[in-house]
Every structure is written in C-alpha cells, then in structure tokens.
Amino acid sequence: MLFPTVNFALFFFFIFGIAWLLKEQNTARKIFLLLASYFFYATWDPQFLGLLVGCTLANYGLGLWLSKTRKKGILIFGISVNLSVLGLFKYFNFFSSSLCNFLQALHIHVAPPLVELALPLGISFFTFQGISYIVDVYHGHLQAKKSPLDVLFFISFFPHLVSGPIVRASEFIPQLESPRELTSTKAHHALLLIAAGLIKKMIIANYLAIDLVDPVFEAPQKMGGLDAWLALYGYAMQIYCDFSAYSDMAIGFAALLGYTFPENFNQPYRSSSLQEFWKRWHISLSRWLRDYLYIPLGGSHEGKKKMVRNLILTMFLGGIWHGAAWTFVIWGLLHGCGLVVERLFKEKQTPPSTDPAASAFWSTVFTFHFVCFAWIFFRSDSLSSAGNFLECLFDFSRTNTRTTPFTVFLVALGASLHFLPTHGYEGFTRLMEKFPAPALGVVLGILIAILTALRPDEIAPFIYFRF
C-alpha cells in the first residue's frame, strides 16, 4: 500500500479510529498497532514477514543479554548478526561477482557463487533500527525491555517501516510507556505535512520522473545537452521531493497516532557546504552514521590521518547502504572525499571574505553542483550509463526533446521549496488552527480530489523503497 492511494487512506482511517478508541488501554493499543503494521508489511511482501519478526526478536534477546553484562564482544556479535542478514540478502551476489571479476582480471577464472534471493522490503531500515536498539542498551541510553512488545512495535511501526526515518530506540521506545495524546496543534501540523507530502510526490516527483528524468537517464545518447542538464537538476528535485514527501507523510501519520518522529529533511539544497548538506539531507541516516559509526571509529579527535580514514569509510558505507552497486560506492566516496577536502581547508586559517553574502552564495552554488554531479552515479543503472550521461552533458549537437516549459516549471517549483521561510510549516500550522476542523477536512478533501485529477495515471513507488 503506497501512502498516496485510496487503499492506504481507507487502511489509515480504520487504524486511526480504533487506535484512539483504545487510548486508555496502552498495551492493547500497541498490540493492535503492531498487528496493523504487520498487515501493512504483508500487503507488500508477506514472504519476509517472518524475517522481520525473527530479526526483531533476535535484537530483543541481544538487548536482554547486554543488560546483564555489557560486554563489547556481545555488542559486536549483535551488530554482526544484523549486518549478516543485510549482507546476505543485499550484498552477497554483488561482492561475489566483484571478487570473481577481480580474479578474472588476474587470469584466474572462477564462476561466482550466486544466491537467488529477493530483496526484503525495508531491510536496510529495520536492520539499522535493530542495531540502534542494542547499541543504545549497551551505552545505557535505554533500559532493555523485559517484554518483546515494545521492541517489536518500535522496529515494525508501519509509518517508518519501509523507508524511515531511522528512529533511534532511545528516542522512540520511551514514548510507548504511557498513553498518547493528540493536541490540536499536533493534528494540524500532521495534516499539513501529509498535504505537503502528497503535493511533492504526486505532482512534482512523479511528473519529473515520467516527463524528464527517466527518459533522459535511460537513453542519454539520444538526448541533447540541454536535456541532460535539465534532467540532472530535475533528478536533484525529484529525489528530494520523492523522499522528503515520504518522510513528511510518515512523520504526519505517526503524529496523528500520537508518536513523534525526528525531522528528516531541512531544505538541503540551500547548504553552503557538504557538512551542512548532510545536516539537512536524510538527517536520521546522517545522525545514525555519525553516532554509531563515525564517532565510535574515533571521529576527528585522533589525528588528521584517522579523521580522513573515518570520514571516507563512513561515507563509503553510507553509499553502499543505499545499494549493492559500484555506482553507489562512487557516490559515497565522492561525498567522503568532498567532506575530507572541506575539513582540511577549514583547518587552514584563511582570512574572512570581505563580502560574506557573496561568499555564501558561491559556496552554496558550488555545493549544489557537487551534490548534483554525485547524483549522476546515484541515479545511473551502471558505470557505463553514468559515462554516457556525462558525455551527453557536453554534447549540444542533438535536438532537445525533453526540455519543455512544463519540465522547466517543475524543476523550478522543486527548487523554490528551498526558498520558503525556514519555519514555514509552523507558520502555516498557526494559520490553520484559526479554522474549525470541519472546514479543514473539506479543504483537505478538495486538495486530494485536485491532486488525484492532476496526477499521472500511475503512482510510482517511492525511490527509497529500493534501499
């Protein structure tokens, strides 16, 4: 069930009603929402429901073990268990094929052992959340739960199960200890997030994909240079609108059920550095990589050489987390090397610019184009496809067939979201609170009807469903 569909709307209205009827019965409410989450997952991929439950129970048991004896070896074992599950389903064939290709380059011919396994939906997210639970227990940020219910609920809660945000156990599980409340302000803010997500996904992201990005990236050798440049900017806006739409709606649906998720996007393309970009883009993953990988490796406190190693290793793993392909490896390494260069330049005490506004502007322009350049590898199906796209960027001999007023408008519309007031949602929420709930219901219904009429015939799955 995709969020912007009638089936999900019916599902959520039913869940919403029953959940608040069970408001004073916290345990029954959690059991009901857990079963609803399993039903939600089963509508996508019922064959892996057992894997989801099994991984969760394994982390529950590891948490109890760690609570009795906080030995680092147990933690390493627990992390290894989670990563082994992720590695088997997502990376075994990639590393097997890559090793055999390397051996063949040395004239050692070996047939790669391949395993025919489908990729379980959301495995990258629920394994990382499992690791979050045992790490938080190990460090004492969270008491291990004696009952498995809260751990099962934390990892499987349907709004963030498939594509995040990656919620920390120490931030979410304490919310399960008492009955939830839904204030007028929270409800209005949640509805605003959902409405914004619907617009970004159903209109901007979908039309950019259909009319511009997919045709150009699939056959760049047939496109003109202007098409390629517009598709590059278009993909930057598409992936932002697509993924931030999912995050907005997930945060909104969770809020309507009384639970708080962390912010996941904050106008990332207005960043003036890569470090700032990663504080604004996929914030929950950035924080996870920083706190559970970069800092435990030593961060930047053990010398320049180790700082370089830690940054590159962290972003390499962040890249390959997105997918088992060399394109994702290159994307991660580009960001890792970029962050290293930024850090080394900052350490040199250069005199401040005489025109800070101009300096910030050009830094933002450069950062945006660096991020866009890296998106080429993220979006391309292979290294050869990325090469073809790069060639097309500088080939203006062919006719441009995808550059139309409509596609230019969509790219501009996606970019304009980064120039809205920083706390725009809060301002709109205060404005919405002045109107009675029935009026807002009518407005939301009209908006959904308009979006349904304007959207493409097919709603594509969210981009991050593949990861």
Image (cartoon, rainbow, N blue to C red):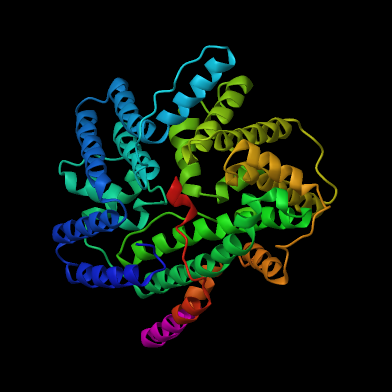
Please name whichever residue, 422 or 387, is drawn nearer the observer in this view of the structure.
Answer: 387
Q: Position of residue 239 (x, y in %)?
A: 56, 55
Picture quarter containing residue 83?
top left
Query: Do we see residue 314 in this rendering?
Result: yes
Looking at the image, residue 98 lies above or below residue 328: above
Relative to residue 336, is residue 392 depicted above or below?
below
**Image x and y of residue 288, in percent:** 45, 40
Give percent across and percent down for residue 284.
46, 47
* Residue 436 covered by magenta stretch: yes
| Front in this rendered view, residue 123 or 176 | 123
257 lies left or right of 393: left
In the rendered view, does 359 fall on the left or right side of 73? right
- Residue range in magenta is 431-447
Q: Quadrant of the C terminus?
A: top left
- The quadrant of the rendering that contains the N terminus is bottom left
Q: Classify 348 as above or below 437.
A: above
User: Can see residue 173?
Assistant: no
Q: Nearer the viewer, residue 458 or 464?
A: 458
Would residue 390 be counted in the magenta stretch? Answer: no
